Image (cartoon, grey):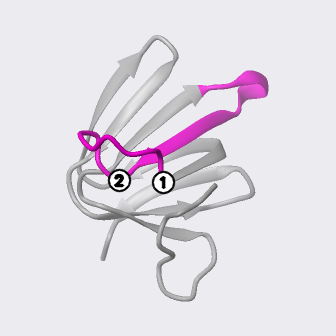
Amino acid sequence: MNKLAAVGDEEGRWHLPQHAHVIVYEAERGDQLLTIYDCGAAQKPPSAQVIGNLVRIRAPHELERTVTGYIVSMREESVLERQEKDHFVIVSDE
């Protein structure tokens, strides 16, 4: 499931809205499950789920640790980029 808007014609880059929340669950074998919501306050299903590792966040955000992983609350529009087969980064939308 991935309903995120692609950035341009490039593959592996998706737009994250200003108030996006990325819920990161630690999974077996060292992978993570990234569940992405357009807005943390909205009562809507997630926009996307991907399996991999969120290795870096280079955009304004807040981070909250949880028992099962962590929550990344974005503070500006940003881009989720696939770096390798299973590595992702979040960068400022420039």
Q: Residue at x 71, y 50 (%)?
A: 86
Residue at image mark 2: 38
Q: Is residue 68 magenta?
A: no
- Where on the picture, by quarter, is residue 64? top left
> Is residue 43 positioned above or below 67 on the image?
below
> Residue 75: where, in percent of width, then height?
20, 51
Report the number of discs: 2
For residue 47, the mark is: 1
Of the numbered discs 2 and 1, the one sitting upstream in the chain is 2
Mark 2 neighbour class, 10 Å CA radius: few under 14, some 14 to 19, many 20 or more: many
Q: Looking at the figure, which quarter contains the N terminus? A: bottom right
Task: Please name the amino acid that badge 1 sits on.
Answer: Ser
Task: For marks 2 and 1, give the CA distance.
Answer: 6 Å
Mark 1 neighbour class, 10 Å CA radius: few under 14, some 14 to 19, many 20 or more: some
Question: Going by the image, does 90 lie left or right of 6?
Answer: left
Tell me whether circle 2 and circle 1 mark residues in contact (CB < 8 Å): yes
Q: Residue at x 63, y 48 (%)?
A: 50
> Is residue 55 positioned above or below 93 on the image?
above
**Tag 2 secondary structure:** loop
> Residue 36: where, in percent of width, then height?
46, 47
